[in-house]
Amino acid sequence: MTTLKNQPPPSLTAADMVKFKNYLIENLSRALEGQEIPPGKQTEYVTQGVAEVYERSQLKLPDAVRQQLTQDVLNEVLGYGPIQPLLNDPEVSEVMVNSAKSVYVEKKGKLTKTPIVFENDQHVLRVIDKIILPLGRRVDADNPAVDARLPDGSRVNAIIPPVAMDGPSITIRKFPKDRLGILQLIEYGSLTENMATFLRACVLARLNLIISGGTGSGKTTLLNALSSYIPENERIVTIEDSAELQLQQDHVLRLETKLAGTDGHGAMTVRDLVRNSLRMRPDRIVVGECRGGEALDMLQAMNTGHDGSLTTVHANSPRDALARLETLVMMAGMDLPLKVVRQQIASAVDLIVQQSRLKDGTRKVTAITEVAGMEGDTVVLTDVFKFDQTGVAEGGKILGELKPTGIRPIFSPRLEAAGLKLGPEVFGANLSEMLGNRPRRRE
């Protein structure tokens, strides 16, 4: 073990305790950097280092305080400081550091304030630097906001003063260790078996799908689940700002955007990657989220033979999703008439799947809507499935039912042509009513 010099005094005040902990963190971090220790041995190395310094310091701390000291040092040296326990908690889906003294989490769809605090703003900045520096990113007064991701894929946004008025802020959307599939989503009540059967047929028949939803509604989770229906023999190109998709197929090419260098050159946007992907012989293009002019390139790809494409947009309803797409296409700078844009959307998009986070924190597919063409200057939408809210139970739980509307989509012949004939029960038909409850004939 590396010998640490300048030992702390044998008796500590509260302020000295903080200095002692920072002394351990600084020296053990430096010692760890100077040696090639396998990741699996680093926890043991740091724990041993804390124990050695503690023994030489001749301090007599209560066991609980000593254990907490060791854990705090481990979190700082090998993790992300005070928020590391939150990242380790499987029930926490999002961590929000509003300021050094205000940390919230999302658990099971509910926001809760935690007792966790940072020492000061500099402490928060150190954690931000620890996240972004290995990725070659930077954050400063000229570039006060940065997007990054943790090694496990969790999405990170950090923003600092002068933009963040109350001090540096970190928002981490955790990457689930266990990828949710369709069966789990059915089990959680996010959608029904009939809805899953219908969506499977749409993916296999190479329909173009847009998943619409608000922030944190579960769009990426649903996109992941639906992508599992793509056949193994197809070449898939995924395009994302921060790689989150976990496609299980073997033939997947993952592309991720790149920020410009310090000289302002070298950026690769989602739009650049969508255009480039068309030269890569994709069978399917999966864009994590359309949020700019790439929406036009995506629609053109859908209209020129790249069927079966999937993407997500931020919107609160299928009709809002169309308006959002129109706005994004306008951002491409092509100055297209609105009617032409709507015709592009109506001919390219087959289905909008609306994902929502309800007031009780649950996430559901609240609508599956067909884009049925144009009537005059208006895009026609037809709900195939809809969530019907019936009330609110005690505790705020939303009551309702996911059910088909009884309408078969116009593209049903495309499903049948792909060998995917769906029975009338999928769309809500009651077979006994269809047969008129006729009595069985006596032999």
Image (cartoon, helix red, strand yellow):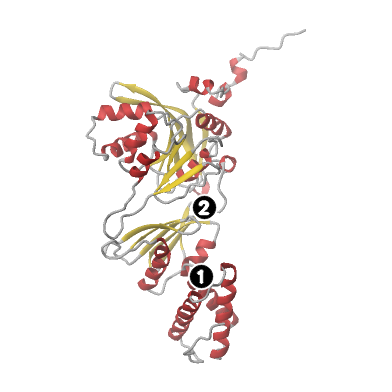
At x 56%, y 46%, the residue is 180
Instruction: For mark 1, give the secondary structure.
Output: helix
Picture quarter with the C terminus:
top right
Give the farthest residue toward the right. Answer: 443
Tell me the amino acid under the disc marked 2. Lys
Give how far across and how far down residue 119 sits, in percent. 41, 74
For residue 300, above or below residue 418: below
Closest to the observer: 37 or 220?
Answer: 37
At x 40%, y 40%, the residue is 277
Q: Is residue 386 visible?
A: yes
In the image, which disc is placed on residue 149?
Answer: none
Give how far across and how far down residue 30 sits, in percent. 46, 78
At x 59%, y 71%, the residue is 41
Instruction: For mark 2, give the secondary structure.
Output: loop
Picture quarter with the N terminus:
bottom right
Give how far across and how far down residue 347 sits, in percent. 36, 26
Can you tell which of label 1 and label 2 is closer to the viewer? Answer: 1
Closest to the observer: 162 or 150?
Answer: 150
At x 24%, y 31%, the residue is 336
In the rendered image, which residue does mark 1 sit on?
78
Contact between labelled residues 2 and 1, with CB atoms less than 8 Å apart: no
Tell me the amino acid under the disc marked 1. Leu
Q: Earlier in the sequence, mark 1 or mark 2?
A: 1
Give how far across and how far down residue 248 sits, in percent. 55, 44
In the rendered image, which residue does mark 2 sit on?
108
